[in-house]
Image: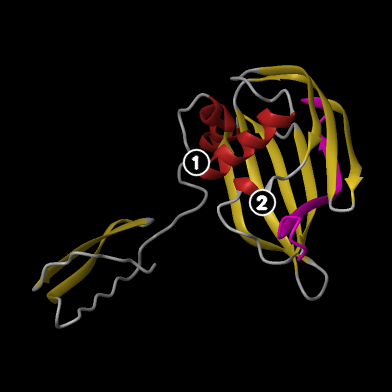
Amino acid sequence: MFPLGLALLATQIIWKTSCDPLTIYKTTNVECGTAPKYSVNASCVVKAINCNKAVANVDVYLVQQLKNISVRFQVFKRDYTNKMQPWLIDVTINMCDIIERRNFLPYGKMIFVITKSFSNFNHSCPYSGHLFGRGLYIDEKIFPIVFPFGFYKLSIHIYENFYDRQREYTCEPLTIYKTTNVECGTALNYSANASCVVKAINWNKAVANMDVYLVRELKNISVRP
């Protein structure tokens, strides 16, 4: 179930000269691991290119063909105690669905943009034999936002048949997002008679019904989440 694990430690630097990018994502360390049932001879090496850029070279040999590949992508940030703490992102994505365009999750697309540019992980499933990455680095252009200044660890775990095995052992989702309360408000000049009600469907699902009446036409609408 767990053929290969990768952990990339990246540093974000603020560069204030006009000739260089304002934000630099520099890889400082890469660690690899394998599960003997699926992969062997993993190798990860960081090579410095200049003072603000380093690239990673990665190799692994698959001893079994991978047909249903999922990736767990986690981001950690170093806190004031010098410890790596979970930071915002922890998702599991079926990469075969991303590659074959059956799924369009943003984090999956970001991972595939990186892998297809620097490795032979660039075609539809299945995968077998020698997987490698050359000159791998993080391009800040793929991120929708600029990360706050600091040290980050990107953890990538690769699974075979992750979702199938989940269904064998559990009948409910691993993570549940349940609506427990909804509150409504109005602005007297624009709306009236707002109503918000939560209705339970089962123990792990509830839905919301909402109504509001506009007393003036809205022509330029903005939303603040």
Type of the residue with mark 1? Leu
Which of label 2 and label 1 is nearer to you? 1
Q: Give the side of residue 165 with respect to residue 132, left or right.
A: left
Q: Is 205 drawn above or below residue 210 in the view shown? A: above
Q: Give the side of residue 158 with respect to residue 145, left or right.
A: right
Q: Which residue is denoted by mark 1 in the rendering?
A: 105
* Quadrant assignment, res 99: top right
Answer with mark 2 or mark 1, whichever residue precedes in sequence.
2
Tell me which residue sits at (47%, 46%) in the image. Answer: 173
Q: Is 52 drawn above or below residue 3 in the view shown? A: below
Q: Nearer the viewer, residue 198 or 191?
A: 191
* Image location (x, y in percent) of residue 221: 26, 65
Q: Nearer the viewer, residue 55 or 171?
A: 55
Q: Give the side of residue 63 with respect to residue 218, left or right.
A: right
Tell me which residue sits at (38%, 56%) in the image. Answer: 204
Q: Which residue is denoted by mark 2 in the rendering?
A: 74
> Is residue 37 something one can see in this rendering?
no
Q: Is 189 drawn above or below residue 221 in the view shown? A: below
Q: Nearer the viewer, residue 206 or 213?
A: 213
Q: Is 94 drawn above or below residue 62 in the view shown? A: below
Which portion, as a residue range, is magenta?
16-39
- Colouring of the image: secondary structure
* Quadrant assignment, res 134: top right
* Image location (x, y in percent) of residue 73: 65, 46
Q: Is residue 32 magenta-colored?
A: yes
Give the total of numbered labels: 2
